[in-house]
Image (cartoon, rainbow, N blue to C red):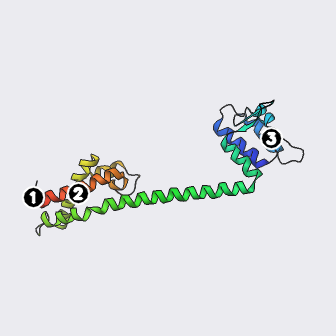
Amino acid sequence: MRNRSTIEFLGLWEKLNNPIFKPIEFERFKNEAGANAFVLSPQRWIEATNAIGIISKSGRYGGTYAHKDIAFEFASWVSPEFKFYIIKNYQRLKEDENSKLSLEWNVNRILSKLNYKIHTDAIKANLISNELTPSQIGITYANEADTLNVALFGKTAKVWRDESTDLKGNIRDYATIKQLIVMVNLENMNANMIEKGVS
């Protein structure tokens, strides 16, 4: 080993994963790296720094083995083609992850809205009268929504907001898909009970 960036990677890996790593020896190797005369064997690295990320054994059944993080670093240094494939695969995985998150978020939003209109229409047709002020109308809608929130989440929207000041959105934005499916059914059942005049 003589590549400075590889030695820096080894040192970083050991600092993060090895409580008995000797950082002073690592700094010495890092400072010497890059010079034409500098060569660092795996055995010398292991003995000098107490490294655990590389294992090197001599003899008939010996060999040098490395943790997969370190093996990827060496392969990337030795083969630009390998490094290119690592980068492309990383980008593909991140795109897949973002796509799945986006899909789950869309499913959550669709489930949240699925029976919302049925529910609010039932409230409007059966619980809202001309005698109510705009403030009272808002309270009526909120009370019906909170009846369902308490049934499903065990708390009202206001209690959730007071407990979750660091989060944006509302209680239903943080519900699981299972909870949202239950909420869709609760909204439908509540709409039916409102239309039938059930208290």
| Place of residue 66 in the rendered image (x, y in percent of width and height, measured from the top left) | 71, 39
Cα–Cα gap, marks 1 and 3? 81 Å
Residue located 31% across and 59% down the image: 112
Residue at numbered disc 1: 197
Answer with left or right where residue 152 lies relative to residue 127: right
Q: Earlier in the sequence, mark 1 or mark 3?
A: 3
Q: Residues within 10 Å of mark 1 (few under 14, many from 20)?
A: few
- The one nearer the camera, 78 or 6, is 78
Residue kind at label 1, given as amino acid type = Gly
Under circle 1, the secondary element is: loop
Residue located 19% across and 67% down the image: 134
Cα–Cα gap, marks 2 and 1? 15 Å
Q: Residues within 10 Å of mark 2 (few under 14, many from 20)?
A: many
- Residue 110: which quarter of the image? bottom left
Residue at numbered disc 2: 187
| Place of residue 49 in the rendered image (x, y in percent of width and height, measured from the top left) | 75, 34
Q: Earlier in the sequence, mark 2 or mark 1?
A: 2
